Amino acid sequence: MTTADQKNKIDLLVRTCRMLARMNRARPETRKSQSLYYQMMVDYYTRVNNAHQEGKKIASHTVFFPTEILYAMDIVPMHTEMTTWLIALFLKEQAELLEKGAEQGLVPEICSPHRGVAGIFATNSIPRPDVILWSNLICDNTAKSGELMMELSGSPGFFLDNPFRNSPGEIDYLVGELQDMVSFLEEQTGQKMDWNKLSEMVERTRHEIALYREIGELRKAVPSPMNILGYLELLSADYMYPGQPEATQYLTLLRDELKEMVEQGKGAVSRENFRLMTLFIPPMHLMTSLARLFDERGAVSVVEPLFTLWSEGELDPDNPLRSVAIKSFMIPERRSMYGPLDQQALDDITESAEKYKTDGAIYWAFMGCRHTCATIKVIKETLSELDVPMLTIDCDIVDPTITSEEEATGKIEQFFELLEDR
């Protein structure tokens, strides 16, 4: 392997995901949708790797960005935070990137995915993006990281200002922002917006959101048919492939698999003992060990109300740009992570606890996400009123030095013992 190959984290991600896809296809017990998920990761990062050789432009963007616009303009997207997550999950090489991020002045209290992104750009570990796109959705870390990425990459950038509240006037404002962004991208990349293509994506996105809702309903079954790794898959489908045929294919296949399991009375684990609500995202470097522990102990994450339950809203393919704006108000994470924590978010938690028959909840208190950690007390009190105990685990979504595997699994084991005694 050449020095350039060793430096290119994207190339390593492609190789690792390709290997995982092969391994999953060789295991008859593995969900076909899970094998498809790994192939989606291969295809996504292969496009990033080959973009410049094929004469295409790359846009690095932060989380919850309206990627449909990039796909409609034939611009190759690269999700910055997701890339850091997957480097931690698949390559276990986040330490170097976090160290380089620290050299840029980012202290440990800053969101580690953004510290990792700074490290990626500082070490030239990815193909250089042609444009940087970022927004204030979902936090201050996101709002500021784009400026640093522009400085490190030397690429031009565009900041998308998302309003806090959902009203006709604020939707109009966001549509104006999106129009300005399209003009910026056309000027910087030479790519023109294909409005017919965007309309097709809005139609697919509408269908995909319906599939997310169907999958959520199937997970209410006792026993529940999807394990904790499915949580990351669901996030990846929308974060990386919104409105794309790949996401539709994956979600349709997953829906069909789960439906068949429910009809046959099969669950994700051989014997379901604990039905858990997951609040926030488990550390990426612990996902494999968590899946193993949950399988051994008969635990299933049946619902993630703040991440996988979509808000109501109507998308209109005949008005695609406005639909893209409306979708940004529908994303599950917005209810608890952007603007004030309102009663709707607490009602969603209450309803989920009841409808999914949860035995307990685990809140992954990501130290770099201060605004979500501020909600822990009120969420715990809300669940306490329903007699649903909640375990809080201080952690970091990428950095393994904050909470070790032994510490996290030990606390979860104790929590399972508490649930057994109830």
Image: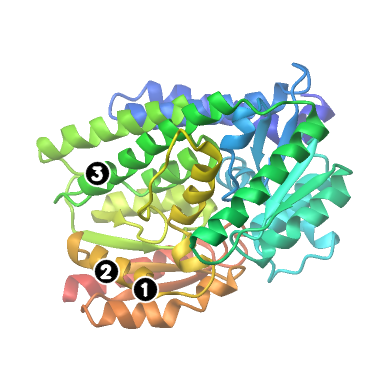
Residue type, numbered disc 3: Ala
User: Marks 3 and 1: CB-CB under 8 Å?
Assistant: no
Q: Please, what secondary structure does the residue beneath circle 2 have?
A: strand
Give the distance between the C-alpha atoms of the residues marked 1 and 2, in whole angstroms. Answer: 8 Å
User: Marks 1 and 2: CB-CB under 8 Å?
Assistant: yes
Residue type, numbered disc 1: Leu
Residue 305 point in image, percent of width and height: 35, 60
Q: Please, what secondary structure does the residue beneath circle 1 have?
A: strand
Residue type, numbered disc 2: Gly
* Disc marking residue 268: 3
In front of the other: 40 or 94: 40
* Disc marking residue 391: 1
Image-based side of 279 in relation to 300, left or right: right
Residue 377 point in image, percent of width and height: 42, 82
Residue at 55% of width from left, 45% of height from top?
Answer: 89
User: Which of the two labelled residues, at mark 2 and mark 3, occupies the earlier sequence position?
Assistant: 3
Residue that mark 2 sits on: 360
Q: Quadrant of residue 161?
A: bottom right
The N terminus sits in image quarter: top right
Give the distance between the C-alpha atoms of the residues marked 3 and 1, in whole angstroms. Answer: 22 Å
Residue 382 point in image, percent of width and height: 31, 79
Numbered circles on residues, count: 3
